[in-house]
Amino acid sequence: MPVKPYVVESDATMTNADEAFQATGMKEMCERNGVECLNLRHVEDKVTIQIANGETLDNITVPRIVTESAIISAAKLKTHMMTGVTLGMKNLFGLLPDKMKAKYHLKGISKVVVDITSVLRPALTVIDGFVAMEGRGPSSGTPVQMNLIIAGKDVVATDATGCRVMGFGPHKIKHIMRANEKGIGNIDNINIVGEKLESVTRQFKPAKIL
């Protein structure tokens, strides 16, 4: 059976995914390559996934296509005012089809990210660091030219590596550390191929963690 790729996103409280597809050029690129841009908020066929021993959630409801696909988390290398960093794990928050996502922040966003990752682990995580962001991320920070891509099959290890590239200790990032503790992935003893970590590390200005 041929593989059918999708580029997916969902609406957020202040963002319309369809408008974002258009504004960023993603829609045009996908049309040029015969790939469908999918706003998960408008997918009617949904399933509920139970979360055993969740940090704060008992279950999540997502489009069925999410559970039947190999997920590639395409994230950015940047800081975040509530979670410290927003990388591969935090990017999975976009799989939730709810527009009013603020309700999840009230439950503790780091805990929610761990719960999502525990049941929707990506097959591959790709962190785009060509132009990263430091300071008041995720949207009001300062661009940083890094010319870097970080990729891996273990989303926790990939995120931990992204943290180290930005000069942050992954053990101090709550959702990454907790995912490591729960056996979702690995923080330490990571086999890094390609560029040496020390040759691409830059100390980022942190965001204020609320």
Image (cartoon, grey):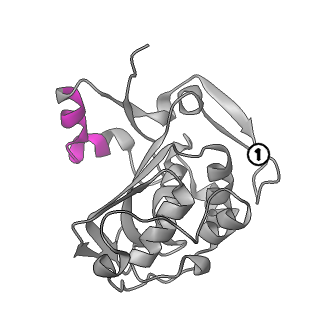
Residue depicted at x 59% and y 32%: 67
- Give residue 94's position: percent from left, percent from top: 49, 48
Residue 173 drawn above or below residue 97: below
- Give residue 50's position: percent from left, percent from top: 77, 40
Residue 87 in the magenta stretch? The answer is no
Query: What type is the residue that disc 1 sits on?
Result: Ile
Magenta stretch, overall SS: helix
Please indicate whether residue 154 sits to the left or right of residue 23 in the image. Answer: right
Q: In the rendered image, is residue 198 in sight?
A: yes
Residue depicted at x 74% and y 61%: 182
Residue depicted at x 58% and y 69%: 187
- Give residue 134's position: percent from left, percent from top: 34, 78
| Quadrant of the rendered image containing residue 131 | bottom left
- Give residue 22's position: percent from left, percent from top: 24, 40
Q: Give the range drawn in magenta.
A: 20-31
Q: Residue furthest top?
A: 1
| Quadrant of the rendered image containing residue 47 | top right
From the image, tell me which residue sits under label 1: 51
